[in-house]
Image (cartoon, rainbow, N blue to C red):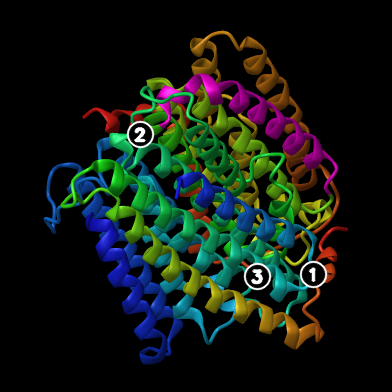
Amino acid sequence: MNVLLISAILGVVMMFSSFLIKNTATVRTIGITGTIALLILNVLEMYGTRLFNINTAGFLSFDRFTLVFISIAIIAMLVYFLLTAKDMEKVNKVNYAEYFALLFFILCGIVLVSGFESLLILFLGIEIVSIPLYVLTGSDKRNLKSNEAALKYFLMGCFSTGLMLMGITLIYGAQGTFTVELFNFTKNIDSPLAIAGMLLLLFSMAFKASVAPLHFWTPDVYDGAPTVFTSFMATIVKAAVFFSFFRLFNDSFTALAPQWQFWMAVLAALTLFIGNITAVFQHSVKRMLAYSSIAQAGFMLLAIFAMSGIAKEGLLLYAAAYSFASIGIFSVLTKMDDYTFDGFNGLVKQQPLVAAAITIFILSLAGIPLTAGFLAKFYMIQAVIQAGGHLWLAIFALVMAAVSVYYYFRVIQAMYFKQGNANIQASNTFKYTLLAVAILVVLLGIFPNLITNWLYF
Amino acid sequence: MPINYYIFLSLALFAIGMIGVLTRRNAIIIFMCVELMLNAVNLLLVAFSKMHYLSAGSPFSTAGTDGQLFVFFIMVVAAAEVSVGLAIIVMMYRNIHSVDVNFLNRLKH
């Protein structure tokens, strides 16, 4: 609750500072300070301090699981600001503060989708996340690719919103309420309205979370959008959509599990297969990361399939591991001119520190032991095995993780073993922040209870 | 009137909108078809709201009010989407002087 209201206020503050403050460094400082304040307020709420006492019963509820996820999202946003906020100037210097405003509004939406108790709030949250994202995607106004990505994202997004609304309405017809707690699918489990509604919701959430076979918009949109904003879309927003996906199907549709669980397994396998295999054939690192985000989505789907305590912990760990590592790689990519694999040739000679940090991020994304990515994948696969009956899915996920090593390691190969003199303009602050994030990724890989303990204590 | 009529009418409108989105090439017409889908949902929500009110039995019941509330939220969100969507379409028109979505194939290498 604290974060929801304060980040909305921060968004308005940033909107005003766009014409009051001309100095971009000041704007950036306000944004970063605001994010730190949000983090502190959220941790306070976790231990019982609420700034506002508003009765949101039946609409929003913030349990420990949700609050921990919101903390992870805010930390990821802080890392994002520290690493890439400066590069937003490259997109458009005049609208600099407005980008911060839109990002804070997206954070509001993230809080709504992760704490929803009513399908109304889920719908509003998804829209509050999506509408600023359409603007950010098209923010490079003169660039045809950015225009195209924005229009495509917008049309696809509207279409899937329509499907989601139809799903919500059909469920309302069957249940007579939007409040998730009051759903009683056991009474009329074979009601065609409820089943059709659930399938439409599954379809539209899969769309938003870019699950195959509804992923086709993702690579184009991620490729066309300015790289700074791709970084935000592919990490924090995607994790939030998955979190709401998880809550929707685990908390609300538990009684319907026999109807959707098998299809969820099929979707996960398909997503893993398409994401990983297509990523192998990419020439541009940005496009490769777009496909890899689809592949990682496949792993996060395993948590929704498994529906257990360990899947919950795994989902949080996965959100953190994936967000930090991807934001790190994207922040370096933003500073490069050449997005192909060859653009990384010989980076180690010029920037040994940056190359070392990228190596750690890549190892984490590929799931090599001692990094956060390994444990995240480990939790997911353990959850699938414990759920029982679908051992093939666990084995398939392992094989696909092995395939992913091939395309991830091409970046390491280019940096360390190829001739070239790739270089980036990086300040010392940037390098040390990047290194700190890399250390965080390794720490999470050794002590996962840094995150999972928050769930219980 | 039985609720089935309303369900079929709404589903028909929704299907017309969906087919329009999938087959038309003009960005503005696609956009109108999306609005048609949203309005089909609004109609169905109001019908369900009335159905739940009647099935509650008492004239003082508040059953079904949340369905009508939802309609207002859909209208507001649709208005917000229109403002952003038309801005994006205008931005594209300024650059290529066309609103044809066949243009959207350039990103696929």
Q: Which mark is residue B15?
A: none
At label 3, the amino acid type is Phe
Q: Residue at x 37, y 46 (%)?
A: A114
To which chain does the residue with label 2 belong?
A
Whole-angstrom CA distance, mark 2 to mark 1, is: 45 Å
Q: Residue at x 62, y 26 (%)?
A: A263
Q: Horizontal and vertical percent for residue A271?
A: 69, 34
Left or right relative to A15: residue B19: right
Give a yes or no on whether discs 2 and 1 share a subunit.
Answer: no
At label 2, the amino acid type is Ile
In this rendered view, identify the residue nearer to me: A447 or A224: A224
Whole-angstrom CA distance, mark 1 to mark 3, is: 11 Å
Give a yes or no on whether discs 1 and 3 share a subunit.
Answer: yes
User: At numbered mark 1, what does the secondary structure look like: helix, strand or loop?
Assistant: helix
Pointer 3 residue: B31
Q: Residue at x 24, y 27 (%)?
A: A456
Q: Mark 2 vs mark 1: give the one in front.
A: 1
Pointer 1 residue: B101
Categorize mark 3 by other alpha carbons within 10 Å: few (<14), some (14-19), many (20+): many
Pointer 2 residue: A451
Magenta highlight range: A253-282
